């Protein structure tokens, strides 16, 4: 086993999740590389010191440049606002340091493209934090599709729906300012990533983006509340995706349905330890969707628990992600999703936004 010094930029919601994951991953997966929480960075010295004490880092700083440059920081996790991603990543890659960056990649498609170039020029491990696709259930869904269990995929329907802004009287905040913080910037990338993982590359899109509550107590809203995308995959399958932060009653509506020529799959993150599978075989009178409870037979489940149906949770997804990042560093082999894979999500989002403006289909290759 070899120690590796980890620096995390950002100590909030995702910064904490990554700190906990790096603390636990060695014990859960018996990784060859064992993370050492070396330094955490926050926008203020007081916050950074608070995170250091709470999460167990050796040191804290309010300057991300100091974190990146520190020789004891050997790999970097970016869990800061999107408009900081590019500068931090480029500085890290210039020093040959691996980077795990929270989604989406940068604050613009130009940022994403620049970050891909920097990552590939450096030739070091790079990953984007799309954690939901790492649940044992969704990993198993990917395997079923790849193995041909449901035949040729003909239709994909996905959603990422939540209701944290369903109340029109909820106050304006940073979440209501700027497209990077809107539904297409915040929620949509997760489901677009799932669509790419489960059904393959997208060829063209028709997008529609809408702000339902343009005024909120405290200010005007400058980004989108919900959006939808019709799409055509390169393999010929049709698709539809819907994203919303005003979906009343939905708490974690990361859900998809995939129809194939021999069967179908359904999944809902609010019941993340179950996958529904339909196989078009056997007598008609006994056919139907079967609920599969995840267990040790499914990908990345057993390291957490030996009991089928006991389940994994949100934090476990981040731990699996940490394992994959460490594996990429150790082996020198790319682990999906790389920065290039993350940028493919950016291209789909950019095309959908342009489509909404033009009210016409847009080819992904134009972005």
Image (cartoon, helix red, strand yellow):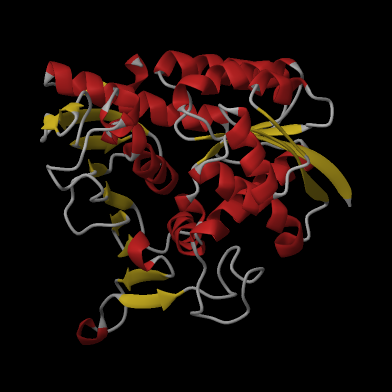
- Spot occupied by residue 42 in the image (x, y as percentages of width and height): 59, 31
The one of 289 and 321 positioned closer to us in this rendering: 321
340 in relation to 292, above or below: above
| One can see residue 142 in this view | yes
Residue drawn at point x = 21 percent, y = 38 percent = 171
Residue drawn at point x = 41 percent, y = 40 percent = 193
16 in relation to 174, above or below: below
Q: Is residue 222 left or right of residue 21?
A: left
149 in relation to 91, above or below: below
Q: Is residue 14 left or right of residue 212?
A: right
Residue drawn at point x = 57 percent, y = 47 percent = 16
The one of 117 and 84 positioned closer to us in this rendering: 84
Give residue 174's quadrant in the image: top left
Q: Quadrant of the C terminus?
A: top left
The one of 320 and 73 positioned closer to us in this rendering: 73
- Residue closest to the far front: 46
Residue drawn at point x = 52 percent, y = 31 percent = 80
- Residue closest to the far right: 1
304 in relation to 43, above or below: below
Give residue 178's quadrant in the image: top left
The one of 317 and 347 positioned closer to us in this rendering: 317
- Spot occupied by residue 329 in the image (x, y as percentages of width and height): 75, 38
| One can see residue 123 in this view | no
Q: Is residue 80 left or right of residue 233?
A: right
- Spot occupied by residue 59 in the image (x, y as percentages of width and height): 76, 36
- Number of marks: 0
């Amino acid at each position: 086993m070899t120690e590796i010094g980890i620096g995390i930029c950002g100590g909030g919601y995702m910064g904490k999740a990554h700190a906990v994951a790096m603390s636990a991953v060695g014990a859960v997966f018996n990784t060859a590389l064992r993370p050492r929480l070396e330094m955490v960075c926050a926008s203020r010295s007081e916050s950074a010191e608070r995170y250091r004490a709470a999460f167990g880092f050796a040191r804290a700083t309010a300057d991300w440049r100091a974190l990146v440059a520190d020789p004891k920081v050997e790999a970097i996790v970016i869990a800061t606002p999107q408009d900081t991603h590019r500068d931090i990543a480029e500085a890290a890659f210039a020093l040959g340091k691996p980077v795990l960056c929270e989604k989406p990649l940068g604050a613009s498609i130009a940022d994403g493209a620049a970050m891909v170039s920097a990552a590939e020029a450096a030739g070091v491990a790079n990953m984007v934090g799309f954690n939901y696709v790492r649940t044992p259930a969704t990993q198993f869904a990917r395997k079923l599709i790849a193995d041909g269990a449901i035949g040729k995929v003909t239709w994909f329907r996905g959603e990422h729906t939540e209701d944290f802004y369903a109340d029109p009287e909820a106050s304006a905040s940073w979440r209501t300012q700027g497209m990077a913080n809107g539904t297409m910037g915040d929620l949509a990338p997760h489901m677009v990533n799932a669509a790419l993982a489960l059904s393959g590359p997208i060829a063209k899109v028709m997008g529609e983006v809408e702000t339902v509550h343009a005024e909120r107590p405290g200010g005007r809203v400058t980004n989108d509340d919900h959006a939808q995308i019709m799409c055509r995959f390169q393999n010929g399958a049709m698709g539809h995706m819907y994203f919303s932060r005003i979906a009343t009653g939905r708490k974690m509506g990361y859900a998809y349905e995939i129809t194939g020529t021999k069967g179908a799959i359904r999944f809902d993150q609010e019941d993340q330890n179950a996958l529904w599978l339909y196989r078009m075989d056997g007598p008609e009178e006994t056919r139907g969707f079967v609920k599969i409870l995840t267990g040790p037979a499914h990908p990345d489940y057993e390291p957490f628990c030996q009991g089928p149906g006991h389940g994994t949770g949100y934090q476990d997804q981040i731990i699996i992600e940490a394992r994959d990042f460490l594996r990429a560093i150790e082996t020198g082999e790319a682990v999906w999703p790389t920065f290039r894979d993350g940028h493919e999500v950016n291209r789909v989002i950019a095309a959908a936004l342009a489509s909404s403006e033009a009210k016409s289909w847009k080819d992904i290759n134009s972005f």
